[in-house]
Structure formats: structure tokens, C-alpha cells
């Protein structure tokens, strides 16, 4: 079975080490999205005193968020999911600790376009 493994990485200083670790673990492709959480946005809004009269949403939030990286990949088998948890925690420390990240895996019922290992 295939799984969608998603990591919301809190400390972006770890991102290249995570990419390397996932690739060494056998991940064929990684997609990266710059992201932030609602709680962090809400914490920062009260501290802005330079907001123009008619700001665009993009300009209002640009430079405001503390960024995360949401990293995901489609992998085959629960063994690979466990391997990614292990190598991720070797970089970040235990994901049960605050300010490390959140990793989850969802089973995928159908997938097309993902090459099998060795292809």
C-alpha cells in the first residue's frame, strides 16, 4: 500500500538535513511547501504598527509569519513510513517535543504516476 507522508517542519534550519535523510532512506521525490500556522499568525498580528490604510492580504502577511516547511512524499509500505519517522527524529529530535514538527501518514487508495522502486 502507498502512503502520503507529511511533515510540518517547525525549524526550517533542519530542512536540508531532512531532505538528505529522506533521500538516503529511499524516498523518490519530495514536495516542499512554505507554510505557517494560524496560531503564529494570530500571535504576530497584534505587533504590527506599520499597516497601511488599505493593505492587501499578501502585503499584510508578507514577512509577518514565522515560516514552516510542509514536506510530503508518497512512499510504499509501512516500513518506509517508520523509516522516515526514524530518520526525521534523528534530525529534529523527538517529534513529541515542542517546536519540532508534526509528521503523519495517510493511506492512499489509488495512485498513478509514482514509479516503483528500481524503475
Image (cartoon, rainbow, N blue to C red):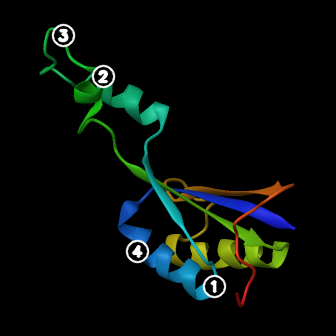
Query: What residue lies at 63% left-to-right and 78% top-to-bottom?
Result: 27
Whether residue 32 sits left or right of residue 4 in the image: it is left
User: Tag 2: Cα neighbours inside 10 Å, few (<14), some, or many (≥20)?
Assistant: few
Task: Residue 74: give x, y in percent of width and height.
Answer: 69, 65
Whether residue 97 sits left or right of residue 15 in the image: it is right
Examine the rendered structure and indicate whether residue 27 appears above or below residue 110.
below
User: Tag 3: Cα neighbours inside 10 Å, few (<14), some, or many (≥20)?
Assistant: few
Farthest residue to the top: give it. 53
Distance of label 1 from label 2 (alpha carbons): 39 Å
- Which numbered disc, 3 or 1, marks the residue that appears first in the sequence? 1
Distance of label 3 from label 1 (alpha carbons): 48 Å
Nearer to us: label 4 or label 3: 3
Distance of label 4 from label 2 (alpha carbons): 30 Å
Q: Dividing the picture into quarters, in which one does residue 30 lie?
A: bottom right
In the structure shown, which secondary structural element does the residue marked by tag 1 occupy? helix
- Which numbered disc, 4 or 2, marks the residue that appears first in the sequence? 4
Q: Which mark is residue 100?
A: none
| Residue hosting label 1 | 25
- The N terminus: image quadrant: bottom right
Query: What residue lies at 25% left-to-right and 19% top-to-bottom?
Result: 56
- The C terminus: image quadrant: bottom right
Distance of label 4 from label 3 (alpha carbons): 38 Å
- Whether tag 3 and tag 1 are in contact, CB under 8 A, the answer is no
| Residue hosting label 4 | 16
| Residue hosting label 3 | 54
Q: Dividing the picture into quarters, in which one does residue 23 lie?
A: bottom right
- Which numbered disc, 1 or 4, marks the residue that appears first in the sequence? 4
| Residue hosting label 2 | 57
- Whether tag 4 and tag 2 are in contact, CB under 8 A, the answer is no
- Which numbered disc, 4 or 3, marks the residue that appears first in the sequence? 4
In the structure shown, which secondary structural element does the residue marked by tag 2 occupy? helix
Amino acid at each position: 500500500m502507498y502512503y502520503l507522508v507529511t511533515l510540518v517542519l517547525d525549524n526550517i534550519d533542519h530542512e536540508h538535513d531532512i531532505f538528505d535523510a529522506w533521500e538516503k532512506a529511499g524516498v523518490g521525490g519530495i514536495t516542499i511547501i512554505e507554510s505557517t500556522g494560524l496560531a503564529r499568525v494570530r500571535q504576530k498580528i497584534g505587533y504590527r504598527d506599520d499597516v497601511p490604510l488599505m493593505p492587501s492580504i499578501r502585503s499584510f502577511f508578507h514577512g509577518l509569519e514565522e515560516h514552516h516547511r510542509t514536506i510530503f512524499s508518497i512512499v510504499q509500505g509501512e516500513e518506509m513510513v517508520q523509516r522516515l519517522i526514524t530518520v526525521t527524529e534523528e534530525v529534529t529530535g523527538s517529534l513529541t517535543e515542542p517546536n519540532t514538527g508534526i509528521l503523519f501518514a495517510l493511506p492512499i487508495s489509488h495512485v498513478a504516476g509514482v514509479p516503483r522502486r528500481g524503475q
